[in-house]
Each structure stands twice: as C-alpha cells, then as structure tokens.
Image: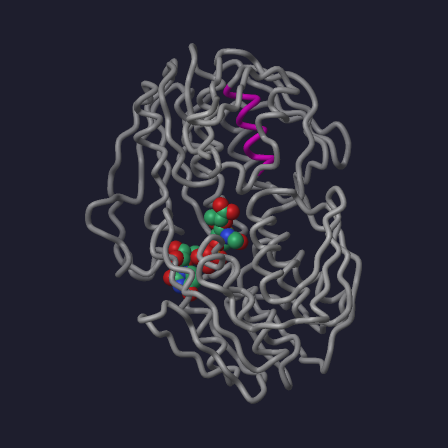
Amino acid sequence: MAESFVIQGGKPLRGEIKVAGAKNVALKVLIASLLTKDELILHNIPVIDDVIRLLEILKSLGIKSNIDGHTVSISSKNIKSTTVPLEVGARIRASYLALGPLLARFGEAIIPNPGGCRLGARPIDRHIEGLQKMGANIKYYSEDGYFHATTKKLHGTTYHFDKNSHTGTEALILAAVLAEGETRLQNAAEEVEVDDLIQCIQLMGGHIERKPNREIVIEGVSKLHGAEYTIMSDRNEEVTFAIAAAMTKGYLIVKNSTPHTLTPFLKEFQKSGGIVEKISDTVTKYSAGKKYVPTHVTTLPHPGFMTDWQSPWALFMTQANGSSTVHETIFENRFSYVEELKKMGANIEFYEPKINNPKDYYNFRWEDHSDGCCQAIRIVGPTKLHNAVLSMHDLRAGATLLIAAMSAEGKSYIQNVEQIDRGYERIDKRFKAVEADIIRVTEGGP
Ligand code: EPZ
C-alpha cells in the first residue's frame, strides 16, 4: 500500500536525535556473511527496508538471520542455492555484491543484472572486469536478465580501476579475501564505508591492507571465521539532520555523530553560515545561522564533497543570499528533486559546465550521459519556500523533500515515501520527536 507524509511546515526542529548505522555498510557486511560458515554478529544495523529486503534475499539462498533490536546474527552454514532470484534481487541493487563471495566459496553464482536506477545507468563493468581477471567466467544473458558466473578457483590479480567505484572496490575485496594469492586493487575507492567493511573482514580473519595512493592489497586465505562487529554511523543521515536544523531555523543535538567523516561538508556548512558546536567526541549540535553565504560545490569521490550530500545541499542553498552552483560529477542523473523544489518556489536553473574532456572528468561513463540533462544547477536565494504536493524519486532526494516540506510555510504532501523508508529508519517518528508536524497516511486507507 502506498504511503504519504502530510507535513505542516514552518516549525523549527529542536531537540536530540540519534544517527543510525550506515546503510551503505550494513548491506555489505551482511553480504560478507557469505564468506564463512560461522555466525556473524553485527551491531548498529539500521532497521530499514533495504536491510529487510536483503535479509529476505539471503534467506532465499539458505542463510539464516535474526534481528534483535539493531543487532543481526547471521549464518550461511546451510547455503542451499547460489542463484539470487530475479524478483527479489531486482528490488535491491546491492544484492549483486553476492557474486564475489558465492564464486569464492562455491565456484558458481547466478545474479540478476542490477540494472540502472533513478540515478542513471549504474553499470557494473568495473566489477565484472575485475572478477574476470581473478579467474571468473562471467556471461550476461539478456534473455533471462542474469549474470551467469563460474570459476574453478579465484586467484589473485592486479586490477586498476579506470575510475572510482565504491561498490566496485567492495565487490573485488569480497572476492579476493578467499582467492589464491595476492590481489592489488589500484585507484581503489577511499570512501570511509569501504574501510568499515575492511575492518569487519579483518576481524573475520581476512588479510587486507590499505596502502598509500589509493591501493588496497589483499592476501587470500583458505577460510574465514565468525566475528562480532559494530558498524559506523550513517554520515548521510548526519548531513540530513544538520541541514534540517538550518532549514527549519532550529537546532539538533546529534548523537552518534562522526564529524571526522564529514570534513568537506562541515567546511562548506560553516563557511556558508551554519553553526556547528562540538558537545563531545560523539555529540554535535547543528543550529541555524542568521543568514547564509552562497557557495560553489562540486561532488567528488572521497575525500571530496560526497554525491549523497548534493541534494540536501542544493536545498540549503535556496536560503543563501545570492547565486550558488552545484556540479554533480559522480552520477549522470541525480537532480530528480529539482523540479519538486521548483514547485515550492525555489529558483533553480540547469546549466552544462564547460569541461574540456568530460569522458575522463566525470566518474560515470560519458556514453551513459544523455544530451537532454545537465550536470550542474544554479540556485538563486534566498527564497521563502511554500507548500506543495511532492513526489520522491530516490532515497536522498526523498530526504531533501522532507526537509523542504518541514521548512516551508503551509501543509505539504509527499507521496511514495517508501523510497525514504529504504534508507532512513522511522524517519517521521524521529523528526516528530524533535517537534516536526508529520503524519504518515496510507493511500486508499480506511
Ligand atoms: C555507492 O554507489 C553507494 N551505494 C551510493 O549511495 C553512493 O552515492 C556512491 O557509492 C558514491 O559514494 C552503496 O554503497 C549501496 P560507484 P556505487 O560505483 O557503488 C559509475 C545511496 O543513496 N560506474 O562509486 O554504485 C556509476 O554508474 C547510494 O545510498 C560505472 O560506470 O557508486 C556511477 O555513475 C546512491 N561502472 C559512478 O561510476 C562501474 O562498474 C560511481 O559509481 C561502476 C560504477
């Protein structure tokens, strides 16, 4: 049943809120359970739809799991299949990461083509190339929409990523830890979520070392054992909360805060006029400033300004005095929220930056870029946003529209909120606890 939020905006958020565990670590450490017969105990796992769906997919392979609060115990002792069913696999992209571990442990895997999503084509060519260099035979059959993979034994290799890939790096780590010999990943992703996965696999007995100049070296071992691990906080949530405090002219005292993972965000936020106060090592207070200075932000792989922060940042810049720009270089279609914000009165225009060699400059494949859409927006503020009927297209855009509705005068409606439930645990309840006026309604309900 589709659900919507009804939001009475214009109320400052005030109070304490806790950051949940990182979605983009939780999905990977759950998949890492395929690497051992022993039980993995994972703490600080967010109870979000993507995690629930992934556990259903892993169950279809024969994996047993139990959720107790935010702790998941999971064991792949009784694997009964190495095929990720299309109907469930297609519901959560990250399920394709099971390819490496299934090949490493069982020598075979059949997984659905993750396909594109609302952010663009999102191919996995860099993943497939790396696995093939490790000795995997992988063929894609468009008739059934599956990748069919087999291997006698995965072996170490040196693989150079031509461009950054966050889950591509993770996919090859998950395959290399049980491969024969040494694997060197060059131009490997440095997103902090990758390091969290590395730490978990090291606790399981994996030999993985991050070297200087974006290199990761993995020494394959014959088997891994169980472990108990607590994953990091979700830095995308913390950015969402900081901007929500500023946009609603209130403040949020954020617990489980990890400012050391947010350096480029904190720099821009404070430069623009947002107020950040360190209460303790794990508690940060974010407050609205008096007025905001426009900024010019370009999204980049870590350690740059993260693409997941792009949409809430663009919303924040609608309140800056003057003209700001946001240039998206990671995904070719990550501005779905712009038309929705324009319904609320935001002054945002698209433009195409002049780039000498876009093929090398952008992190996506230039052939996936369609001439219709642009990679940058110009935002002129400050604008007093007003209410509207809004629709969510992807997870981060959803969070952005929620903040926009809470900060705008009047009553707003946001449809298909299941998008936000994918990555934010009970977000309406948590915002209500800090004085937001949000009601969740079921469409076509009683
Ligand atoms: C991960 O996506 C995250 N998802 C994204 O978060 C995040 O925005 C992104 O990394 C950047 O940090 C998960 O961890 C589940 P990439 P990923 O591989 O790994 C292209 C969220 O909201 N590319 O670094 O898919 C690709 O299309 C999500 O939580 C290829 O062309 O990102 C994209 O344009 C959104 N071929 C760009 O590179 C490949 O083989 C970056 O992709 C791989 C990627």
Q: Is residue 128 above or below residue 133?
A: above
- Please, what is the dominant secondary structure of the magenta stretch? helix
Q: Is residue 86 above or below residue 252?
A: below
Indicate the quadrant where residue 207 lies: bottom right
What is the x, y in percent for residue 291? 48, 16
Q: Which residues are magenta?
A: 237-247
Q: Is residue 430 left or right of residue 345?
A: right
Q: Is residue 146 left or right of residue 22?
A: left
- Residue 238 lies in magenta, yes or no? yes
Inspect this view and state whether residue 163 appears: no
Indicate the quadrant where residue 147 lies: bottom left
Q: Nearer the viewer, residue 11 or 84?
A: 84
State the colouring used for the structure image.
one colour
- Residue 303 lies in magenta, yes or no? no
* Residue at horizontal 57 percent and vertical 17 percent from the top: 436
* Residue at horizontal 67 percent and vertical 56 percent from the top: 196
Inspect this view and state whether residue 297 appears: yes
What is the x, y in percent for residue 150? 50, 82
